[in-house]
Image (cartoon, helix red, strand yellow):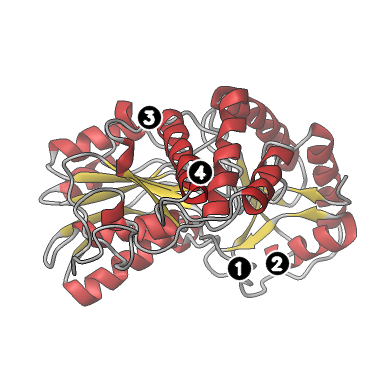
């Protein structure tokens, strides 16, 4: 058993089911080849593993139509960049929100600078809601809207289906970022009307780092972000029209795909509903406990749905120092900083010092939550270092 309490699941599932580890090891030991690169038995077996992964992912997240519209990526950031840059032309309008991750915001900034894309940001409130009037204004004439499935700072989750419908009524396509959704919040792309969905494999889907996916609804054209080898149609100078090769250049992370497939299988056996309910109960326990500690301000609202995230600041000690002491003195591992979501922190007024985020995962126990609460209570009662500048402790891919 680990000698620490891991409460940084929103960053990555650093503790994985044994089956995921075994799947990666088994792939490397018994297969080792690359999907789509050859007709020999190992390449065929590698292709089978990749196909089973896309089929499982489609079943879990409600991807409709041909599973070939699911392309493997490095992570959600890769998928988001592929979708946004592949859809927008010079002069187009992109709508983002105050809750978006830098995977969206930095991509939008680059397209505004390099292509003259007009970027409109929908403001919101600290309870995770969007300004409805501003949403309608921003969507007027827009080509694409990005939707954050769940805030990685607040844990709040919007009504994705309603926002997709509003965007479609305005003539805009939708891209849903499921980095904090897939595997722990019920989501069905077909039912909610999403046009594109970016997925990362290393969070609640329990796969290893370095593998994710992008699903694009049939009929939507996306220019490839990367070009290169696809294993077929090699005489063409352009990328093949056939999916997923059209946007899936280069060798994929086959061992990661094997691990992701095992992680998805684990989630499907347990069910997203149960995973979400278990995490929600622990989130409520954690949030209530943190709220009761003198000098702690809880920023995550008491929402019944959403990601199992609770973000705080302390009156007497800055987030980076608190995180360091929780680790060093109590073995509690959490994430301080701006969480790659600067506009959300600007909204909360924490853009200078950042905040401290606790996040719950499949292996979190009530004893671990209680241990973390005792640790925060003990440290918050001591003299801290107030007002320090923000110190980032890593980023999300």
Q: Is residue 111 left or right of residue 267?
A: left
Residue 153 appears in the picture as rendered: no
Q: Residue at x 89, y 51 (%)?
A: 3
- Which mark's residue is nearer the viewer, 1 or 2? 2
The reply to whether dot 1 and dot 3 touch (C-beta < 8 Å) is: no
Which residue matches tag 1?
353
Which quarter of the figure is the N terminus placed in? top right
Residue 12 in the image, given as x and y percentages of width and height: 62, 52
- Mark 4 lies on a secondary structure that is helix
- Which mark's residue is nearer the viewer, 1 or 3? 3
Q: Quadrant of residue 353?
A: bottom right
Q: Is residue 180 left or right of residue 274?
A: left
Which residue matches tag 2?
320
Closer to us: 388 or 4? 4
**Lower position in the chain sequence, tag 2 or tag 3:** 3
The reply to whether dot 1 and dot 2 touch (C-beta < 8 Å) is: yes
Closer to us: 241 or 35? 35
């Amino acid at each position: 058993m680990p000698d620490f309490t891991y409460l940084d699941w929103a960053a990555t599932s650093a503790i994985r089911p044994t089956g995921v580890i075994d799947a990666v090891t088994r792939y490397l030991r018994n297969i080792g080849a690359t999907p789509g690169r050859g007709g020999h038995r190992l390449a065929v077996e590698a292709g089978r593993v990749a196909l089973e992964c896309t089929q499982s992912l489609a079943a879990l997240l409600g991807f409709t139509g041909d599973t070939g519209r699911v392309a493997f990526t490095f992570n959600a950031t890769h998928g988001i960049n592929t979708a946004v840059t592949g859809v927008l032309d010079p002069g187009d309008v992109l709508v983002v929100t105050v809750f978006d991750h830098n995977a969206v915001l930095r991509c939008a900034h680059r397209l505004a600078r390099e292509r003259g894309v007009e970027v409109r940001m929908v403001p919101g409130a600290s309870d995770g809601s969007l300004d409805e009037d501003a949403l309608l204004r921003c969507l007027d004439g827009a080509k694409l809207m990005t939707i954050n499935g769940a805030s990685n700072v607040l844990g709040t989750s919007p009504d994705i289906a309603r926002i997709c419908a509003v965007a479609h009524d305005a003539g805009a396509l939708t891209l849903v970022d499921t980095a904090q959704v897939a595997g722990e919040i019920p989501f069905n792309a077909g039912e909610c009307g999403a046009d594109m969905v970016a997925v990362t494999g290393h969070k609640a889907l329990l796969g290893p780092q370095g593998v994710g996916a992008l699903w694009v609804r049939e009929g939507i054209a996306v220019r490839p972000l990367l070009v290169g080898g696809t294993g077929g149609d090699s005489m063409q100078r352009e990328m093949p029209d056939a999916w997923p090769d059209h946007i899936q250049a280069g060798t994929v992370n086959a061992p990661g795909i094997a691990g992701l497939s095992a992680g998805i299988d684990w989630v499907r056996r347990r069910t997203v509903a149960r995973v979400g309910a278990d995490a929600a109960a622990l989130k409520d326990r954690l949030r209530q406990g943190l709220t009761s500690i003198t000098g702690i301000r809880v920023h995550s609202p008491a929402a019944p749905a959403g990601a199992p995230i609770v973000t705080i600041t302390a009156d007497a000690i800055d987030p980076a120092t608190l995180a360091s002491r929780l680790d060093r003195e109590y073995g509690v591992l959490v994430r301080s900083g701006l969480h790659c979501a600067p506009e959300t922190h600007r909204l909360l007024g924490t853009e200078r010092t950042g905040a401290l985020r606790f996040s719950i995962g499949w292996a979190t126990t009530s004893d671990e939550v209680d241990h973390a609460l005792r640790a925060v209570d003990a440290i918050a009662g001591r003299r801290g270092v107030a007002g320090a500048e923000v110190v980032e402790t890593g980023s999300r891919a």
